[in-house]
Amino acid sequence: MRVRIIFLLKNKGGYVPFYHQFLLARLAEELLADTDFAGREDFHFSGLKGQTKISKSGLHFYSSRITLVLASPDTELIDCFLQKLFEQKNTEIGMLQLEPEAVEREWLPEFKGDHIKCVCISPIVIMEPSSNELLAKKFISPETDGFSDMLYESTMSRMEKSGAYTAEQIASFYKFQVVPDKGYLQRIREGEKKFARIYPVFNQDNKLEVRGYTFPFTLYCAPEVQEFLFTSGIGYFTHKGFGMLDISNADLNRKTEVYQFNDVRQLSQTPRY
């Protein structure tokens, strides 16, 4: 399931670092810390979305509302996250003062065919630094088979770990290929811009660095794999805010509805990150 969390921005012009996923990851860890979902990794999220301007300090937000997309195959985990979030009247992320206002459920299309056109709404990490931190920062062209092979291996491992698929099903998901939009990559190169950057990841208090990729592509795989990736994320560190996908031109026909979650009120303090 995927939900869109809508916040009221209480201090227009407030800012967060350009890449602020680690702040959101800390928020998620804090909200789930004293629950049955502490330590779980089967969720992922986007960055904060709204009207922004870039400065040396980071992203300054000027829209009255800011949104965050949260997804997980476990509805109860999402409900718990939302319950804890809405217990706070105010949540501070970086230099933003936010108030959770509403939640909408995003309806994904039926996954039927053998391919789907995707965009990245958070960077994709294809290798863990635990195996080789230098190699985890090395650039690997998305146009190579090696790029797809790494994502295939991590996807099959995570699907198997989820326990939701049989060994026979996993074996049948052998077709997997990421084909980047060549026109987009060419325009990026001609404009001397980047689609792959080094990002920080915090494992407890240890700072790691990984390379993340953001580009549109066509994904060739079974419908079951497509659905898994859209609810659980693609690549590594999804619970740290990496690997969230969306469908190309999704906003043109995106269907949403107000999402009502079980409301469990408890006393809590306002977190700051």
Image (cartoon, rainbow, N blue to C red):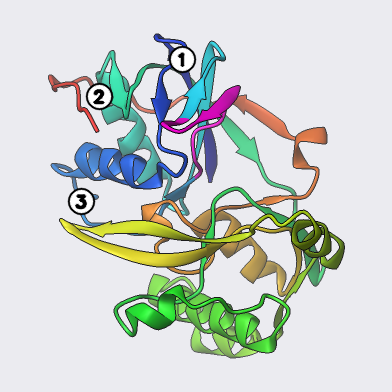
| Residue 196 percent coordinates (x, y) | 58, 63
Residue situated in front as seen by the camera: 44 or 169? 44
**CA–CA distance in space, label 2 to label 1:** 33 Å
Q: Quadrant of residue 214?
A: bottom right
Badge 3: few (under 14), some or many (20 or more) residues near its Cα, within 10 Å? Answer: some
Q: In this view, does 53 lie above or below 184?
A: above
Q: Which is more foreground, mark 3 or mark 1?
A: 1
The residue located at (53%, 36%) in the rendering is 3
Q: In which quarter of the image is residue 237?
A: bottom left
Q: Which label is found at residue 13?
A: 1
Residue situated in front as seen by the camera: 52 or 268? 52
Q: In this view, does 194 lie above or below 130?
A: above
Label 2 close to label 1 by CB (< 8 Å): no
Amino acid at circle 3? Ala
Residue 121 in view of the camera: yes
Over which residues does the magenta segment extend? 46-58
Q: In this view, does 76 lie above or below 133?
A: above
> Residue under circle 3?
38
Query: With 70 as the anchor, is 128 left or right in this view?
Result: left
**CA–CA distance in space, label 3 to label 1:** 33 Å
Give yes or no for residue 73 being in the magenta stretch. no
Label 2 close to label 3 by CB (< 8 Å): no
Q: Is residue 98 above or below residue 247?
A: above
The residue located at (41%, 67%) in the rendering is 210
Badge 2: few (under 14), some or many (20 or more) residues near its Cα, within 10 Å? Answer: few
Residue 76 in view of the camera: no
Residue situated in front as seen by the camera: 205 or 228? 205
The residue located at (26%, 43%) in the rendering is 26
Q: Which of the two discs, 3 and 1, labels the residue nearer the N terminus?
A: 1
Q: Which is more foreground, mark 2 or mark 1?
A: 1
